[in-house]
Amino acid sequence: MGIRDRIEIAEGDITGQETDAIVNAANSTLLGGGGVDGAIHRAAGPELLEECARYTGCPTGESRVTKGYRLRAKWIIHTVGPVWQGGEEKEDDLLASCYRNSFRIAADLGLSSIAFPAISTGAYRFPKLRAARIALAETARFLKTDPVLLTVRFVCFNSEDADTYRRALQELFGTD
């Protein structure tokens, strides 16, 4: 199975994904918020907030892991993406770090499947195509060295975002 065959683009609700882990586009407190973060906290239940409160937060670009609680996924990998500030504040590097650190946790746990949202592209205003290119490049880089992770799914909130990821995927791998 090639790298391209292990990457999926889907449209829908990340909280319903049947993967070993889902990734939460968290804020630095890890205590819930809006968008994907709030949806994951609501779907996982109050136990998630209790576990997250044991951490002392999470810096931008880093990741933490908790149980999935009421989700179909066994694990939630929380990562804090950068707020877009025009591209001059190392936003690209910080976003890439979110993916690298999430994949490191996935490898440590021996996961075979993971679902990501479009990290930083909502309230944090990171340009969507730029974010998709970074996400997919980091994914391809990781999959070249990890034979265990068989499915990396990008779950997009709407068809426009899914099309953006498909465009970036085609740029990276060309046509089949």
Image: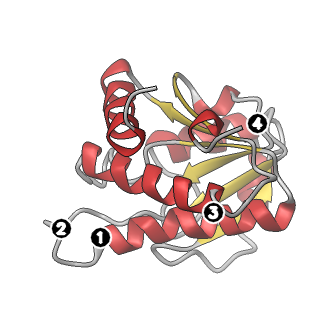
Q: Earlier in the sequence, mark 3 or mark 2?
A: 2
Badge number at residue 43: none
Crowding at mark 4 (Cα within 10 Å: few <14, some 14-19, many 20+)? many
User: Residue 102: horizontal and vertical position, in percent?
Assistant: 63, 62
Crowding at mark 2 (Cα within 10 Å: few <14, some 14-19, many 20+)? few
Residue 95: image quadrant is: bottom left
Q: Which residue is mark 3?
A: 102
Q: Which residue is mark 1?
A: 91
**CB within 8 Å, label 2 to label 1:** yes
Q: Report, in whole angstroms, how far the alpha carbon at label 3 lies from the one at label 4.
A: 14 Å
Q: Nearer the viewer, mark 2 or mark 1?
A: 1
Q: Residue at x 68, y 64 (%)?
A: 145
Q: Which residue is mark 2?
A: 85
Q: Residue at x 34, y 25 (%)?
A: 163
Q: Report, in whole angstroms, how far the alpha carbon at label 4 lies from the one at label 1.
A: 28 Å
For the residue labelled by badge 2, is the local secondary structure a helix, a strand or a loop? loop
Q: Earlier in the sequence, mark 2 or mark 1?
A: 2
Q: Earlier in the sequence, mark 3 or mark 4?
A: 4
Amino acid carrying mark 1 in the image: Glu
